[in-house]
Image: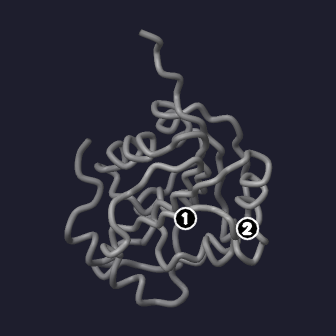
Amino acid sequence: MGNTISEDYRRMQQELHQNPEYGVASLAFAPTVAEVIRQSDIRSVSDYGAGKKNLLKGLAQAGITELQYHPYDPAFPAYGEPKAADLVCCIDVLEHIEPELLDNVLQELARITVNLGFFSIHQGPAGKVLSDGRNAHLIQQPSSWWLPRLSKYFEVVHLQSHQTMGHGIWVIVKPLAKPVA
């Protein structure tokens, strides 16, 4: 598995995270994630791209408090490396990935997804820009572009469009079946 973020981009993400309005999408998706947790007997969650850990706050507000929570975000090195979990959440993250590193990130997500993944993907421009002038959403593509890329690493079991935090999709995925030796 290769690199998932360049050092320059990591610094830009750390700068953006100084903005209190950056990284808040997981609060809007927390009620949906809470339903997935309740319906699927989830005991651990890996929050990939956790930012300020707003998913944990949102889950607590939704009444989910008894689970192992593993945050990961390259902009917050103190969180450590990504950890495997029953449910891997990647909320409003994939559109921020450097396009040439997207496959590496999807491989990493596949490696840590034990049972299910919940990924939300915004499909248009962000309201924020990077310090180099680029839009914060480096990948702005429709679901028809995302599905083949996700399907290379996961079985997509549910796809839904949403207007939460702008136009996008969210998917529930399962790991691809491993061939029996």
Q: Amino acid at mark 1?
A: Tyr
Asked if labels 1 and 2 touch by Cβ distance under 8 angstroms, the answer is no
Q: What is the distance, in whole Å, between disc 2 and disc 1 at their CAs?
A: 11 Å
Q: Nearer the viewer, residue 99 or 41?
A: 41
Residue 128 point in image, percent of width and height? 47, 80
Q: How many marks?
A: 2
The residue at the point 33 percent across, 66 percent down is: 80
Q: Quadrant of residue 5?
A: bottom left
Image location (x, y in percent) of residue 59: 69, 70
SS for callout 1: strand
Q: Answer with left or right where residue 124 lies relative to residue 61.
A: left
Is residue 12 depicted above or below 156 in this figure?
below
Q: Which residue is mark 2?
A: 64
Q: Secondary structure at mark 2?
A: loop
Q: Along the line of sight, which residue is nearer the eye, 130 or 120?
A: 120
> Which residue is pictured at 66% across the width and 71% down the height?
165
Q: Position of residue 112 (x, y in %)?
A: 44, 45
Across and down, in percent, residue 30 comes to: 70, 67
Left or right, 11 with reference to 23 = left
Tell me what residue is drawn at x 74 percent, y 61 percent: 34
Residue at the limit of the structure toward the front, as seen here: 66
Given the image, on which type of amino acid does mark 2 rest? Ile
Q: Quadrant of residue 137?
A: bottom left
**Dot 1 corresponds to which residue?**
69
